Amino acid sequence: MEQSGYKQTKTKRGLTYSYYFSPPASGSGKPVLLFLHGFPSPSFVWRKQVAFFEPLGYGIVVPDQLGYGGTDKPTDPKLYSGRGFAEDMIDILDTEGIGQVIAIGHDWGSTVLSRLLNYYPQRISACAFFGVGYKTSDGSNPLTRSLQIKEMIGYDVFAYMRFFVEAEAHAVIEKNMDSFMNLLWPEVPESWKESMSVDGGARAWLESNTTTALPSYMTAEDKDAFKTSLLSGGISAPLCWYKGLVEQTNLEDDKKCPPTAWEFQQPLLFVAFNRDFIGLPVFGDMAHSKYAKGPVTREEIDGDHWGVLSHPGELSEMLLKWMGGLNL
């Protein structure tokens, strides 16, 4: 993604967003694809999908989410609310005169996509969730259900969040950034059961400055881009996504979305990542069976949490085939 393709706009919340934009090819009639990234990856994580779809004539919008890249980096967790994210995305679309999009989410980007479906369903013609599925706006904190989840899955899936919301977490991460890269992009996906899903595991990993080989799909270019982006802006702002969830600073905001808005009719593509030991496919499957009232297509790849990096061609082909069957 060429830097020259990035633009900036200020949203109604007074926040400056950076986003990559490429309009649909003239006369192509192709839709606009909105790619939504998560933690701790800037918009760069979608570069291979952009390289696939842009030459085919599709419109492309890839924002740097709040706290990342060229976008503002506030450290007030109250700004990291689902409705606020949705409003910001709509402001970007309005800036470019885009009425509807096919939206694709990964990791926290799937939460942003979920809020768009809740608050602005008329702007989403179809939705695709990669790895992490749809999440309701119920204000729930996964750590309050840790025992229930542990009984279902067999381990404390979200234990790492307890460290991410600690006051000094950003300093520990920034001091041991190479170790953090190995923690978040593990060479062995199953290691997350010990490093991320055991109380104190993530902190212990970082404080001992543990380093391993990176996974085969993580190129030197990828590592440098992610590392440079995180260090240049600091990790405090990205961690606010977790603080808003765990500390429930967005609870009152979430309550404004009634349960009647949790169901949606848009066609849904869910691509499960079968070696993701935190974003387990079962979580997405359960949510989609309950709330997705339109046609659901389920695919899967043999990849870890970072399937957007490890299986970009396979994912793009799945997305292309699915879009070809939509009657929009």
Image (tube, helix red, strand yellow):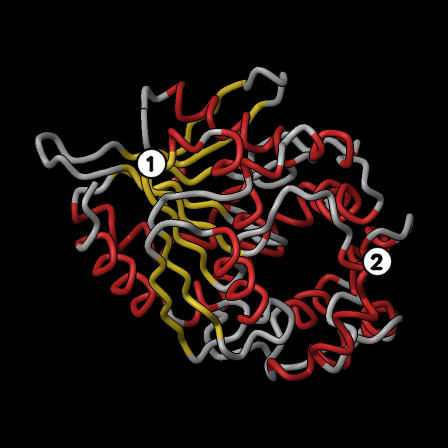
Q: Residue 240 in the image: state x and y as whole percent.
A: 75, 42
163 lies left or right of 131: right
| Pointer 1 local density, CA inside 10 Å: few below 14, some 14–19, many at least 20 | many
Q: Position of residue 1 (x, y in %)?
A: 36, 46
In the figure, is residue 199 to the left or right of 78? right
Residue located beneath label 2 in the image: 144
Reply above or below: 178 against 42. below
Residue 242 located left or right of residue 103:
right
Element type where label 1 sits in the image: strand
How many marks are shown on the rendered structure? 2
Q: Earlier in the sequence, mark 1 or mark 2?
A: 1
Bin the neighbour count of mark 2 within 10 Å (Cα to Cα): few under 14, some 14-19, many 20 and up. few
Q: Residue type at mark 1?
A: Val
SS under mark 2? helix
Query: Which residue, given by chain and number where applicable, does mark 1 sit on?
Result: 101
Say which amino acid is labelled 2.
Answer: Thr
Farthest left residue in view: 27
Residue 219, horizontal then vertical, whole percent: 47, 69
In the image, 314 versus 221, the foreground residue is 314
Label 1, label 2: how far apart the Cα atoms are? 35 Å
* Residue at 21% over, 34% down: 24
Quarter holding the C terminus is: top left
Percent position of residue 276, x then y: 57, 74
Who's the residue at 41% across and 45% down the image? 35
Return the mark for residue 240.
Answer: none
Q: Is 313 or 171 nearer to us in this picture?
A: 313
120 vs 168: above or below: above
Query: Dividing the picture into quarters, in which one does residue 233 lie?
Result: top right
**Residue 206 against residue 29 in the figure, above or below:** below
Viewer-side label of 1, 2: 2
Image check: 18 left or right of 283? left
